[in-house]
Amino acid sequence: MNEIVQPRVKLVAIAKDEAAYLPEWIFHHKRMGFDLIEVYVNRTTDNSQDMLKYLSSKFSGISCKSADWIDYCPAGAQHNLQYIIYSKAYADTLEADDADYVLFLDIDEFWTPKSMATQVQSVIAKYPKADAISFQWINDYGSDAPFQPLRQDILGKINPLVKTLVKVGAPITKIGYHMPELDNGSKHILMDGDTVKRDERVEEGIAKELQHMRPVMIIHRLFRSPKEYVSLLHRGRPSDEMQLKLNRGGYNYVMGREVSYPLNEDNYAQYRQALDGFLQSAELKSLLSIAREFVEARYQKALDAVANIKAKNFHDLARIFRGCTEDERKLVFDTIASSRFLREQESVQTVIDIAKKVDESDLHMGYIIWKRARELRPQGPLIQKRIARYEKLVADGELT
């Protein structure tokens, strides 16, 4: 009898200062059947290189590649880092002929079957004529404690975005973050066989009628824990004028419909036993300790950077810290309350404009700024109305 040849599947990722998460991520995807894993390391200041060297000694098919060459490109090109590296990785795979399919993921994205037993090759086997197979996202809520593994009882919000497994040699016209553009007549499906239809409003997202739970989902662990979320707010380079990423929505704040995705309990227990055993080696513990210390230090840098945020960005500050711990939010409250801007600003309209924006994300922080507006214009009817609203919330115990 002829032996059935399994497709070779490659996973490609770009990592920046993510050594603390590489062991679990690589363990997870090797267990799910991925043959090759390429990690492009870019602008990294943690011990990612040492971590990947260790992991490559424990798993076959792990490679670490530098992506710092992207910094030689003009600034405009650097802003398209993912497009460039993904395109290069795909072209290199075509030339090397070392894989039949390629999936691009971030280190906080986990290709996860609900059964915890399905291998990526079994999905491909159902649809061998497909040029691309997409898997939908769940944005996973974080938990209180840092550095926790993937949970069995996943809870989060379903998202129109996907990540896509691409057949090497398919008629691709452009690589995308989430799905490629293919020639007309190509077969692009979701993992259950539904034909992909793009959402007209969400770039690289699927149409609303296709957004439902499937046996394999991408678990997007963008929050993890408040400490890790805040740590990731720090931009990382001294040359960055803005030291905090102000384009975040807040901890556990994300659009979408809430969903539950419980993993098979017995298979998950076996998975966790194997993962916990893998993490027990002395060398890996030492590497993880260094990596986690880096995350902790970056967390403190993010908190320190709060003091340097300009008044025009107070509303961004309120938004990105909503949902965080009381201590973290108090730091932001105190920073705004003691800011030179509030002490010295004489234009009441400027203060009101900022207060209105801050209100949209955090009423407590808005209250601080409205009180300064009252100092500047004690009899202003709009200001009096807003302050009365806040005082009622305080009296009712809804605002502390």
Image: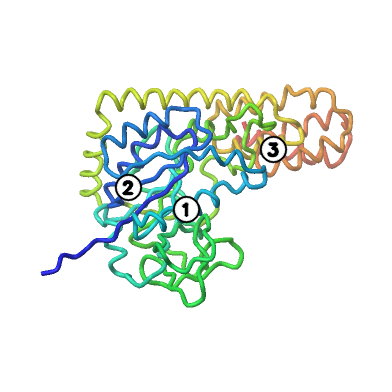
| Quadrant the N terminus occupies | bottom left
- Quarter-wise, where is residue 332 in the image? top right
Check disc 2 and report its element: helix, strand or loop.
helix
Q: CA distance from mark 3 to mark 1?
A: 33 Å
Front residue of 2 and 30 = 2
Which residue, given by chain and number where applicable, does mark 2 sit on? 29
Q: Position of residue 155 (x, y in %)?
A: 41, 49
Residue at figure coordinates x 41%, y 56% from the top left: 95
- As drawn, is 4 to the left or to the right of 120? left
- Quarter-wise, where is residue 292 in the image? top left
- Residue lying at the far left of the rendered structure: 1
- As drawn, is 218 to the left or to the right of 227? left
Q: Does residue 145 appear in this view? A: no
Do callouts 3 and 1 mark residues in contact (Cβ within 8 Å)? Answer: no
Going from N to C along the chain, the mark reached first, 3 or 1, is: 1
Question: Which one is closest to the eye, mark 2 or mark 1?
Answer: 2
Q: Residues within 10 Å of mark 1 (few under 14, many from 20)?
A: many
Q: Position of residue 238 (x, y in %)?
A: 63, 26
| Quadrant the C terminus occupies | top right
Going from N to C along the chain, the mark reached first, 3 or 2, is: 2
Kind of residue at badge 3:
Lys
Q: Position of residue 123 (x, y in %)?
A: 30, 63
Q: CA distance from mark 2 to mark 1?
A: 22 Å
Q: Residues within 10 Å of mark 3 (few under 14, many from 20)?
A: few
Which residue, given by chain and number where applicable, does mark 3 sit on? 392
Going from N to C along the chain, the mark reached first, 2 or 1, is: 2
- Residue lying at the far front of the rendered structure: 95
Q: Position of residue 274 (x, y in %)?
A: 22, 39
Q: Is residue 20 above or below residue 93?
A: above
Q: CA distance from mark 3 to mark 2?
A: 52 Å
Residue at figure coordinates x 58%, y 61% from the top left: 202
Residue 157 has which mark?
Answer: 1
